[in-house]
Image (cartoon, rainbow, N blue to C red):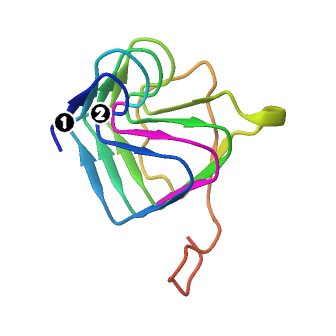
Amino acid sequence: ADNISARAGGLFLDGGTVQGCRITGNKATVSSGGGLDLGGGCVVGNCVISNNTSMTGGGGGFFYGDGVVTNCTVVNNTDLFIGGGIGAGGGHNGQRPEFYNCGQRFGTSRRDIPCRRRGPRLPGHGKQG
């Protein structure tokens, strides 16, 4: 919480899973991903992503390529360019992340991604997201 970086204010991850976290109050001062900056194949589950800020892509987070956000609450994030909530771009063959059971999602994006009701199983969890 409350971190400041040129890119990925809260967390930078290229592949892997983030679960059960509060990612809040972070700032990316030059580039993307105020809360999270994620490479392809990442899974973010059961997290609160709030009150993060970035300059060029995804106040709450930014995905480069595919990935999954499930059972997360994404609120009150801001960005000056792409996606106040979570932005996406740069994926191979048009890959984009998918959102499931997102709770409220504030922020708009030119590349808006719909939220679905049911998602994939998270590692170590017996029920669907």
In the depicted structure, whether residue 74 falls above or below residue 8: below
> Going by the picture, which residue comes out furthest to the bottom?
126
Which region of the structure is painted magenta?
A: 34-44
Q: Tell me if residue 88 comes above or below residue 42 in the rendering.
A: above
Task: Please name whichever residue, 4 or 120, is drawn nearer the observer in this view of the structure.
Answer: 4
Please name the amino acid that badge 1 sits on.
Asn
Q: Name the residue rendered at 57%, 54% in the picture.
A: 15
**In the rendered view of the protein, which quadrant contains the C terminus?**
bottom right
Label 1: how many Cα within 10 Å (few below 14, some 14–19, many 20+): some
Mark 2 surroundings: few (<14), some (14-19) or many (≥20) residues within 10 A: many
Residue contact at pointers 1 and 2, CB within 8 angstroms: yes
Q: Earlier in the sequence, mark 1 or mark 2?
A: 1
Q: Up-down: is 21 above or below 39?
A: below
**How far apart are the two marked residues, 1 and 2, measured between alpha carbons?**
6 Å
Q: Residue at x 36, y 33 (%)?
A: 8
- Residue 3 is labelled as 1
> As rendered, which of 116 and 26 lies closer to the eye?
26
Mark 2 — residue?
9
Q: Is residue 121 magenta?
A: no
Element under label 2? loop
Q: Nearer the viewer, residue 120 or 35?
A: 35
Q: Residue 106: name its quadrant.
A: top left
